Amino acid sequence: MGKEKIIHIENLNKSFNGTSVIRDLSMSLYAGENLVILGKSGSGKSVIVKCIVKLMEADSGKISVFGTEVTACSSNELSDVRSKVGYLFQEGALYDSMSVRENLLFPALRNYKTRKLGMPQLDELVRQNLDSVGLLEAIDKMPSELSGGMKKRAGLARTLMLSPDLIIYDEPTTGLDPYTSESIIHLILKVQSEYNTTSIIITHDIKCAELTGDRICVLHDGNFIAEGVFDTVKKKDDPEVRLFFK
Amino acid sequence: MNSRSPMVYKTQQFLLDIAGITSFVGLFFRNLFTRRFEGREFLNQCFRTGYQSLLLIGVTAIILGLVLTIQTRPILADLGAVSWLPNMVFVSVVTEMGPVIFALLFAGKVGSGIGAELSSMRVTDQIDAMEVSDTYPFNYLVVTRVLATTIMLPLLVFYGDALAFLGSFIGLNAYSDISFQLFYSRAFEDFFFRDIFPATIKTIFFGYFIGIISSYMGYYSDKGTEGVGRSANSAVVASSLVVFVLDLIAVQITDLLLF
C-alpha cells in the first residue's frame, strides 16, 4: 500500500501477573483506513490500543505512532502524539461531575491546539461537534441523565473537539440495543468521511466489524490469526475465526 | 503456586504503598510547580472540603468543649481550682485534642470522599480519558485536592477551637454565673503563642497527608467496583493512622525545641 503508515507495531508483548496476553504481535495501520480488531472478551484487544496511546506500558516491542516511537519517547513527544489521537472509551468515560458542555470544553481549554481560542469560538465548536453526533439538545444535561448510546455519542463529540487524525473506538456497540448500535455504526462512518480520520475499532460485534471495517484482524491467544477484508476473513477455515461468523 | 505467606505478602504490599506514596509526593511537587494551576477546581475543592465540613466540625467542637468542662469541673472544684478550668480546657483543646479529633473527623469525611471519587473515576476510565486527551489529570484531580485539604484543615481547626471555647463557656455557665469577659480573660491568662504555633504547623501536615494518602488510594485503584469501597476504606484507615504518627513526631519535636 502506498499510503502513509500511521501506526506500526513490531513484536509487541504484554503480560499481567505472569500471564501473557499479547505475544509477538505486529501490525500496521495506514492513513484513512478503518481497521477492526475482532476478538473475544478478554482476548487483549483493549490492551493493544492502550499500549498505542501509552495508557499501558508494553513489556517489549516497538510501537510507532505518527512516526514517534511511543515506547521510548519524551513526555513532550507523547503529548504531541496524544493530541492527534482520539479515544472513545467503552462507556464513553464522561466526567460525571460536569455537564455535557463542560465535558467537551474540558480538553479544549487545556490542549495547546485549542486553548488559545476564545470562549465564543470554543462554544461554537462544542455546538458544532454535538450537532454532528446528533446530541445538541443534551448540551446542558449531566452524564447521569444520558442513556448508554447518548453517553457514547457525547464521548465521541468530546474526542472530536481536538480534531484528531486517528480515532480509537473501544467496543463502540457493546451494551447497546440493535437500533442504537446501528446508529453508532453510522456515526463512525459519518465521522470518518466528514472529519477524514483514520480509525481503529475494537469489537466483538460482527455486524459492526462488517459495516465499519476496511480491514479486519482477528485476535486470538495474543496474536492475529486472520487478517484481510471482511469477506476474506469470513471464508477462513480456522475454527476460532469461524466461531465469530456462526 | 504462590508460596508467599499472607504476612510476607502484606508486608510487601505495605512497603510498596510506602514507596508509592513517596513517589506520589514527588509527583505532587513536580506538577505543582511545572504545570498549569487549576484555580477554579482548587476553589471548588476548598468549598467541598472546607465549607461542607463546617457543620460536622462545629457540632463536634461544641460537644467537645461542653463535655470536657462538665467532666473536669467537679475534680477541679474538689481541689478548689475551678478558676483554672477555662484555661485548662482551652489549652488542651488548642494544643492537642482539637487538632487530632478534627483531623480524624476530616479524614473520615473528606478522605473517604476523595478516595471513593478518584477510584470511581479510575474504574470508569475517566482518568484515562483525561490522560489520553493530554490534559494532565494529576494536576486537576490531585494537586487541587491536596492543596485544598492542606489549607482547609488548619482553618477548620481554628473554627473548631473557637466553638469548643464557646461550648466550654456554655458548660461552665450552666453551673455558675461566670460572665463571658471573665471566662475569656481566664482562658487566655496562661495562653501563649508557643501553644498555638506547633498545633497549627501540625494541622498543616495533617491536612497535607490526609489529601496525599486519600488521593493516592483513589488514583491508583484498579479493582472494579470492589476497589472503590476498598480505596475509600484504606484512605480513612491510613490517613487516621498517619495523623497519630505525625502527632507523636510533632510532640517529640515540640519537646526538643522546648515549646
Image: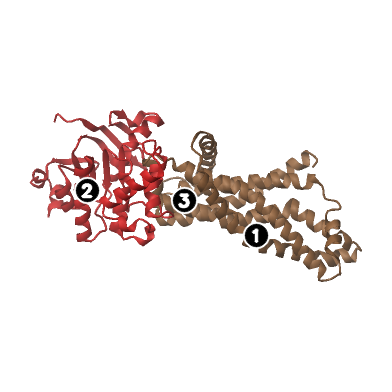
Residue at the image point whose x is 72% and y is 62% from the top: B64
Colour assigned to chain B in the rendering is brown
Kindly identify which chain the residue marked by label 3 belongs to. Answer: B
Q: What residue sits right under mark 3 in the picture?
A: B118
Q: Mark 1 or mark 2: which is in front?
A: 2
User: From mark 3 to mark 1, how far is it between C-alphas?
Assistant: 24 Å
Examine the rendering and report whether any part of residue A97 can be seen. Answer: yes
Kind of residue sitting beneath label 2? Ile
Name the foreground residue: A239 vs B64.
B64
Kindly identify which chain the residue marked by label 1 belongs to. Answer: B
Q: Are marks 2 and 3 in contact (CB under 8 Å)?
A: no
Kindly identify which chain the residue marked by label 2 belongs to. Answer: A
State the mark number for residue B57. 1
Picture quadrant where residue B163 is located:
bottom right
Q: Position of residue B90 (x, y in %)?
A: 78, 56
Q: Residues within 10 Å of mark 3 (few under 14, many from 20)?
A: many
Q: SS of the residue at dot 1?
A: helix
Q: Are marks 2 and 3 on the same chain?
A: no
Above or below, comparing residue A85 to residue B188 in the picture: above
Q: Position of residue B185 (x, y in %)?
A: 85, 56
Colour assigned to chain A in the rendering is red
Residue at the image point whose x is 29% and y is 48% from the top: A128
Q: Position of residue B181 (x, y in %)?
A: 85, 60
Q: SS of the residue at dot 3?
A: helix
**Would residue B119 be found to the left or right of residue A187 on screen?**
right
User: From mark 1 to mark 2, how far is it between C-alphas?
Assistant: 52 Å
Kind of residue sitting beneath label 1? Ile
Picture quadrant where residue B108 is located:
bottom right
Kind of residue sitting beneath label 3? Leu
Q: What residue sits right under mark 2 in the picture?
A: A188
